[in-house]
Amino acid sequence: MQADIHVVLDPVRLGLSIPQAAALLLAHRPAAIFTTGGYVAIPILIAARLLGIPSLLWEGNVVPGRSVRATAAQASALAVSFGQTCGALGTTRPCFETGTPIRDVAALDRVAARERLGIRGPERLLVVFGGSQTVRRFNDAVTEALPELAERAVVIHITGADGHHAAQASRDRLPSELRARYRPQPYLGEGLLEALAAADLVVGRAGSSTLAEATALGLPMIVVPYPHAGAHQSANAELVAAAGAARLIPDAELDGAALLAATAVLERPAEHAAMAAAARSLGRPGAAAAVADLLLALAERTPLPTPEAIAARARAAA
């Protein structure tokens, strides 16, 4: 019954929100609006259209959610991380492949990053992280794969706060000559980007930002898509894997044996180099600048750049 009430009330609330959104826009008078869509954006976008304020919607997943599809037609123009998304949004609005805006990677120096992390010469560096929260399946897989994993590469493992104590205990059980090669950390914060710059392979989820940073750095990946939230990450992972930049392990299949099998690419130089080249071909390090170009054109009421100009801007270093 409660759900039925909201089916009736939500459209009413939405309608009542449009005048409030219009009043807000009239008070602030923005030159343009940037949104990532969703139902909460509908009143603002409808009000913006009524007031003649242009808007840009950005979507980072290959397969957009229903809420994003519901708002796409209200935006003046669309920016997407993956070209396939334009068709999935189901609108005739101008749509541009920009990639995902990320932190500036142009100033990163791989050699300097490896020196700061103490990675010597031909040593391989593997970075394992599952997002901002503790990911038990990732942590258990790394534990199962030790010490073979530490023999294969120096391992920076971002465990989350809850998993850090157990990871330290696993490190202490390693043979003494391998302990320095396994480096569990609860979090790395801004240090993660430098670790990725120094890495030879990353194991992570298939969120838009993770894929964007890895491909901008030409970094091969083992992707383990988050299995919930509409399985959007699965489509992201499949696209990157199909391009040859990643190996895909379904979340339910990630264990120590699967991790060791996937990371064996570190011992196959030709295969690893091919994955790195594929990752670079997908990289869009200038995505933020490309999105900014579109937003500024809308704000200044000038013609939008061509898709070719936006593609070139996105591929260039930020």
Image (spheres, rainbow, N blue to C red):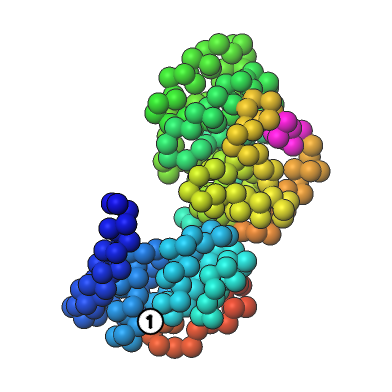
Q: Is residue 263 magenta?
A: yes
Q: Is residue 163 above or below residue 21?
A: above
Q: Left or right: where does residue 17 sit relative to residue 119?
A: left
Q: Is residue 176 above or below residue 37?
A: above
Q: Is residue 282 magenta?
A: no
Q: Left or right: where does residue 71 sit relative to residue 19?
A: right
Q: Tag 1: residue type? A: Pro
Q: Is residue 266 above or below residue 144?
A: below
Residue sitting at 62 percent across and 66 percent down? 84
Callout 1 secondary element: loop
Residue sitting at 60 percent across and 34 percent down? 252
Q: Could one spot residue 16 in this view of the protein? A: yes
Q: Left or right: where does residue 23 sit relative to residue 283?
A: left
Query: Chief secondary structure of the magenta span?
Result: helix
x and y percentages locating residue 209 in the rendered image: 50, 53
Residue sitting at 53 percent across and 16 percent down? 170
